[in-house]
Image (cartoon, rainbow, N blue to C red):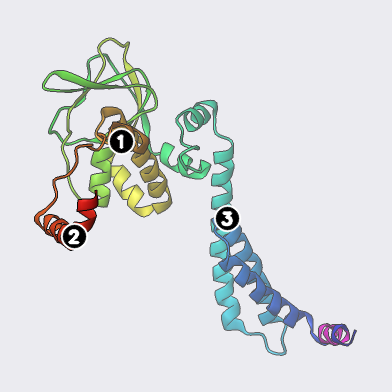
Amino acid sequence: WGVLNQRYAILNDMNLSELAGNLSSILVLLAYSMTDMLALRATSVAATLLSILFQYYRATPLWIPIRWNCVLLLINVTMVSKLYLERRRANQMDDTMETIYQDGQFERRGFSRVEFLRLYERAHVVKLPPGHVLVRQGQRKDGLYFLLDGQVKISRSNITVARLGKYKFVGEISLLGRIEHDIETGASADVAVASSSRGATFLKWDMETLIPFLNEDRQVFNALARYLNYDLTAKLLREGVIQRADTAQINRPAPSKTPETPTAKQKTIINDNQNKNPDKENKQ
């Protein structure tokens, strides 16, 4: 009870200004532990308001920090409004965007709704006829494509090596090479809309605008890189370039059962042992 009485006495002696100052510091510490940007900004707004109250309700108001805190308050309120409206739009995606987000595996492979919205809004829809060549082997790719409908044929030396169906990326190796390694890579094969289909519909991102955006927004870049690396691994597995661990274990040749020929050193040890135990050999 003595400890509780002391705490109540401290609270009674503490005026509203001091209480606001302590609460402001607590909220700042709480904001530092947050990873959600909207919650962090909103908590910073509340902490700044309490800090202004602490600095104003004093015998002599602290006008310099009050003015600067007003500037910080304006910035944070603007950012909270922007982030809230963006999250609201992401949670109210139209049917087309929702279908691509779900069926295209963006949610499953780590994209948040806001990250997907930012990426999607920088793309435009293109419809290409059967046989249209997106890029020829060795040429520079002008964009990143995501197939929404139809089929794409990949060929080398006029030989079809693969076909890509719905919800597959085209041009991802070139994008990752330019961003992560600053290397300009040409297409490894001819990529064209399959002539057997009625055409193909894509989401297309122009490289000249996509790369600066991804360099600026690292959250979207990290989400896209995870998606593309997953996609590339699946392609390498499908083409047999790499093998699953269980498959590699099954395909591994069995060890030979032929007895190994003893080395010269082993022969010397055997002869020494025979010379040391001649009686045992005679009994046998």
Judging depth in this view, the residue of 236 and 221 nearest the camera is 236
3 vs 1, front mark: 1
**Residue type at numbered disc 2:** Asn
Question: Is 34 left or right of 196, judged from the image as shown?
Answer: right
Q: Residues within 10 Å of mark 3 (few under 14, many from 20)?
A: some
Q: Position of residue 279 (x, y in %)?
A: 21, 58
Q: Main secondary structure of the magenta part?
A: helix
As drawn, the label of residue 273 is: 2
Secondary structure of residue under mark 2: helix
Q: Which residue is under mark 3? A: 38
Q: Position of residue 232 (x, y in %)?
A: 31, 36
**Residue type at numbered disc 1:** Ala
In three-dimensional space, the C-alpha distance between marks 3 and 1, rounded to whole angstroms, equals 47 Å
**Residue type at numbered disc 3:** Leu
Q: Which residue is under mark 1? A: 248
Q: Give the mark nearest the N terminus, 1 or 2.
A: 1
Magenta stretch containing residue 6, yes or no? yes
